[in-house]
């Protein structure tokens, strides 16, 4: 079987791109990735996107972007798995390369959120959950995470400060990331005192609304070597789903899909948890990041927040996470987010990091979720 | 959601009716087609017990558009006396009086109204049990 590798990446700064629409944003990131990969003949295109049909009223993004890029005739597909769309499209590309069917695939994600009113965006983001439940209760994603956060604080007797501290660390890491949405450090006092979205979750526990696109060019290792392209291997792929509604899970604070996806990805990579040099985790809300760290096995149950608080996961810590600011500070253009994580892991492993460098990084893990662990994608990247 | 999908689920919402697995007894609200505990497809309608306790809750200050005129409102994860867990809005309660472990009971209420014609959706909310 062919070994899938990443040979180029491209990303836009995350923020409010008033002069760009969905496809032109995607174009910019894809073009950059293709140039870095020395413009190979692309066999297929996968575009991760969650909200195009809800906010931009644009479907069939695969074909649209392929045409804009000048790849007429190339198979192209939009992939939607809510917040995991970008990572999922890269996982699909890796599997297509592995199968031997394709030599070069363009994959990533794009999202355009700032054209719509925040209330419309928040409503559309609910689509990652069971909409019958969301509609009949008035719940939001923030509300669902707030219920988990309170449950966590009550069960393990943890102060909220220790969970919210993850946002402070994200902002710290984002200050040197040129593509991040928020490049300024924040204090815990500021994070704790911001407006409440859904008690106990406030603004700084939540990832922001932003526009962005990130793409990678994937190839088989053989082709990459033939063409003399520098590469990072995608050596493990894990994808899993969970019981959709948190109330029906044996333990709502345990992300079984993330856990399973991580084990499968590690097994495929022939690696163990201890080999992981850094992690890019899905902290759409601070509590989600904490629960992900526990569910992936890096923190014991009930100690995720404590470990964040004691800086186990800081850039200089035992296992750095979200080395460019994570979803909170780098930003969370949902369908593109997983693709940003993959680009960042590539940047770490190739040393294109500036101040954010994790020393001697050989193996990086990307963890991406659609909804509250409804669909989870884990990729193991190796230099 | 459309008026038709509201209509389709009306009995479940009005009667607080879920589904019960005939084989293993697991109960679900909203109802399921297939039991996720034992895999059986033999399910029957069941009216759920109306009392339970708050396991966790939130107060929503940043609602989706459809609910903006009702905010702030509280939503709780509730464990019913039979162990079934459900999500539902809390009503007739001061937010600062809500506690984890608080006893609540199901009550028939207006959930929300929407659209040009003011289509009203009724269903089940939960209020504190007054002893």
Image: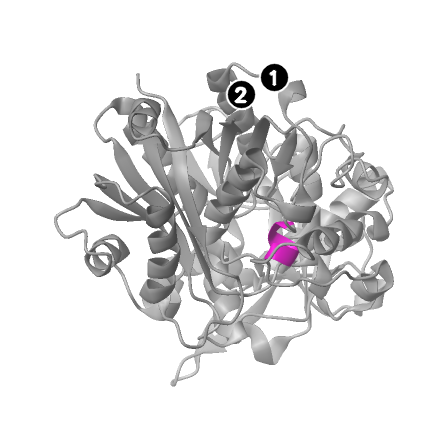
Q: Is residue A275 above or below residue A312?
A: above
Q: Is residue B28 visible in this depiction of the protein?
A: no
Residue most toward the front? A228
Q: Answer above or below: position of A214 versus A44.
A: below
**B29 in magenta:** no
Q: Main secondary structure of the magenta part?
A: helix
Looking at the image, residue B117 lies above or below residue A217? below
A230 or A362, nearer to the observer: A230
Mark 2 Cα shell of 10 Å, populated few (<14), some (14-19), many (≥20): many
Q: Residue at x 81, y 60 (%)?
A: B98
Compared to B124, does B30 lie above or below? above
Do marks 1 and 2 both belong to one polypeptide chain? yes
Q: Is residue B15 visible from the viewing direction of this image?
A: yes
Residue A112: which quarter of the image? bottom left
SS for tag 1? Answer: loop
- Left or right, residue B47 beside residue A63: right
Please state the extent of the stretch shown in magenta in the rendering.
A326-330
* Relative side of A314 to A232, left or right: right
Q: Indicate the position of residue B70 as horizontal and vertical percent values.
A: 62, 77
- The location of residue B39, given as percent across then percent down, is 43, 25
Q: Position of residue A29 (x, y in %)?
A: 39, 55
A350 or A163, which is in the foreground? Answer: A350
Question: Which residue is the site of mark 1?
Answer: A272
Secondary structure, mark 2, is helix
**Residues at marks 1 and 2, CA–CA distance in whole angstroms:** 6 Å
Residue wearing tag 2? A266
Which quadrant of the figure contains the N terminus of chain A? top left
Q: Nearer the viewer, residue A347 or B70?
A: A347
């Amino acid at each position: 079987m062919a070994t899938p590798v990443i040979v180029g990446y491209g990303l836009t700064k995350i923020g409010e791109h008033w002069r760009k629409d969905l496809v032109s944003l995607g174009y910019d990131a894809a073009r950059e990735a293709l140039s870095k990969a020395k413009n190979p003949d692309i066999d297929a295109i996968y575009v991760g996107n969650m909200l195009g049909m809800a906010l931009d009223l644009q479907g069939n993004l695969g074909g649209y972007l392929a045409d804009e890029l000048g790849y007429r005739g190339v198979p192209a597909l939009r992939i939607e798995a809510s917040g995991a769309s970008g990572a999922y499209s890269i996982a699909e590309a890796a599997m297509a390369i592995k199968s031997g069917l394709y030599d070069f695939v363009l994959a990533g994600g794009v999202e355009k959120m700032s054209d719509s009113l925040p209330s419309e965006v928040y409503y559309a983001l609910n689509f990652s959950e069971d909409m019958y439940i969301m509609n009949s209760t008035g719940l939001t994603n923030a509300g669902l995470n707030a219920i988990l956060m309170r449950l966590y604080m009550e069960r393990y007797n943890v102060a909220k400060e220790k969970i919210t501290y993850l946002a402070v660390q994200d902002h710290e890491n984002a200050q040197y990331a040129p593509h991040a949405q928020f490049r300024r450090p924040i204090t815990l006092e500021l994070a704790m005192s911001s407006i409440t979205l859904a008690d106990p979750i406030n603004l700084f526990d939540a990832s922001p609304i932003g526009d962005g696109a990130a793409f990678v060019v994937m190839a088989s290792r053989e082709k990459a070597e033939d063409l003399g392209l520098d590469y990072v291997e995608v050596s493990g792929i894990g994808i899993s789903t969970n019981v959709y509604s948190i109330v029906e899970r044996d333990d709502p604070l345990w992300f079984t899909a993330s856990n399973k996806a991580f084990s499968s990805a590690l097994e495929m990579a022939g690696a163990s948890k201890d080999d992981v040099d850094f992690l890019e985790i899905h902290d759409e809300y601070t509590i989600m990041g904490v629960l992900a760290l526990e569910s992936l096995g890096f923190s014991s149950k009930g100690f995720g927040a404590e470990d964040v608080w004691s800086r186990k996961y800081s850039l200089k810590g035992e296992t750095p996470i979200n080395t460019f600011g994570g979803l909170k500070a780098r930003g969370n253009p949902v369908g593109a987010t997983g693709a940003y994580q993959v680009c960042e892991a590539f940047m770490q492993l190739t040393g294109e990091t500036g101040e954010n460098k994790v020393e001697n990084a050989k193996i990086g893990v990307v963890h991406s979720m659609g909804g509250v662990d409804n669909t989870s994608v884990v990729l193991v990247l190796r230099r | 959601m459309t008026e038709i999908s509201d209509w389709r689920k009306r009995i479940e919402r009005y009667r607080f009716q879920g589904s019960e697995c005939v084989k293993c007894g697991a109960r679900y609200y909203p109802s399921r087609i297939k039991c996720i505990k034992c895999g059986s497809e033999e399910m029957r309608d069941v009216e759920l017990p109306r009392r339970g306790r708050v396991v966790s809750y939130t107060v929503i200050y940043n609602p989706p558009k459809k609910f903006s005129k009702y905010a702030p409102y509280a939503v709780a994860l509730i464990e019913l006396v039979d162990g079934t867990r459900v999500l539902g809005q809390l009503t007739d309660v001061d937010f600062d009086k809500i506690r984890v472990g608080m006893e609540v009971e199901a009550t028939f209420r207006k959930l929300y109204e929407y659209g040009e014609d003011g289509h009203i959706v009724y269903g089940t909310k939960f209020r504190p049990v007054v002893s």
